[in-house]
Amino acid sequence: MNLASSILMIVLTGYIIGSLHGSFLAQWLSGVKVKEQGVKNSGASNATIVLGWKFGMLVALFDIGKGFIAVLLLRFILHSNSFFEDSPTLLLLMGTAVVLGHNFPLWMKFDGGKGTASLIGIMFAIDWRMGFIGLSLLILITLITDYLPIGVLFLYFTFLLYVFWFTGGFWPTFISLALFTLAIWKHRENIFRIRNGTEPKVSAVLKKKKAISS
């Protein structure tokens, strides 16, 4: 298999893996179509808004796991194949394909999630230190600002800085910058709502779910 065929296979495989959504598992268990409720999103944050933190955690773990497994599987294949090196570009291509599959799944008419949980798994698979720093910043910035989208953008920015600083090269930098740009575009409505004061705050969502459960 030549390089072009390998890249095509990586992209297709990543896209298929990425299009498997944890929200579908939450829907199957709860009977609630997550994407049709809340902020009309199929990600973990909306699952938390609609169904509570337990289902949100379930969706997050599923979506983190698919990003982690996809990149780790490719890393194993690259290590076992003497034709390829452990190319950062190929690993980033796999990760990007997973995010694209999550964000634009064919079976959801190309209207999926925002790729945050999948990126966390991808970051841990590439370098656990990057994943730890990115996840820590995501949690810290979210708690400080009380807005998850701001924490998410810091996560993507951490990914961009890591790739630029430790990997370098045109294609890795281009791929990470493209993902960061995509994240801003996918969160444009959240940014607009934050500016208008209508974006759901994390503390408010958790208090609401706690009151309902009690």
Image (cartoon, rainbow, N blue to C red):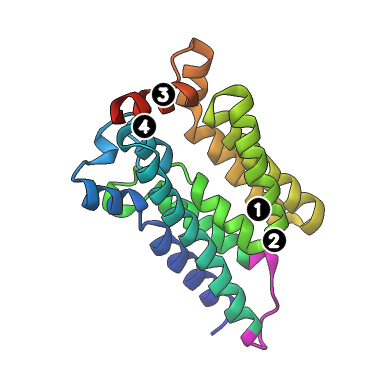
Give me the C-alpha separation between circle 3 and circle 4: 11 Å
Tell me, yes or no, whether the two marked residues, 4 and 2, touch with CB atoms within 8 Å.
Answer: no
Give me the C-alpha separation between circle 1 and circle 4: 25 Å
Relative to 95, residue 199 above or below:
above
Which label belongs to residue 49? 4
How far from the left and from the top, in percent, is residue 203?
Answer: 48, 24
Q: Residue at position x 80%, y 56% from top?
A: 166
Tell me, yes or no, whether the two marked residues, 3 and 4, touch with CB atoms within 8 Å.
Answer: no
Q: Secondary structure at mark 4?
A: helix
How far from the left and from the top, in percent, is residue 52?
Answer: 35, 36
Write down the residue under mark 3: 207
Q: Earlier in the sequence, mark 1 or mark 4?
A: 4
How far from the left and from the top, in percent, is residue 118?
Answer: 50, 52
Q: Residue at position x 23%, y 51% from top?
A: 29
* Structural crowding at the residue carrying mark 4, measured as other residues with C-alpha within 10 Å and reported as few (<14), some (14–19) or many (≥20): many
Determine the image quadrant of residue 43: top left
User: What amino acid is at disc 2?
Assistant: Asp
User: What amino acid is at disc 4?
Assistant: Ile
Q: Residue at position x 49%, y 52% from top?
A: 99
Residue at the top extreme, as displayed = 196
User: What amino acid is at disc 1?
Assistant: Gly
Write down the residue under mark 2: 127
How far from the left and from the top, in percent, is residue 154?
Answer: 65, 36
Write down the residue under mark 1: 131
Relative to 129, residue 202 above or below:
above
Tell me, yes or no, whether the two marked residues, 2 and 1, touch with CB atoms within 8 Å.
Answer: yes
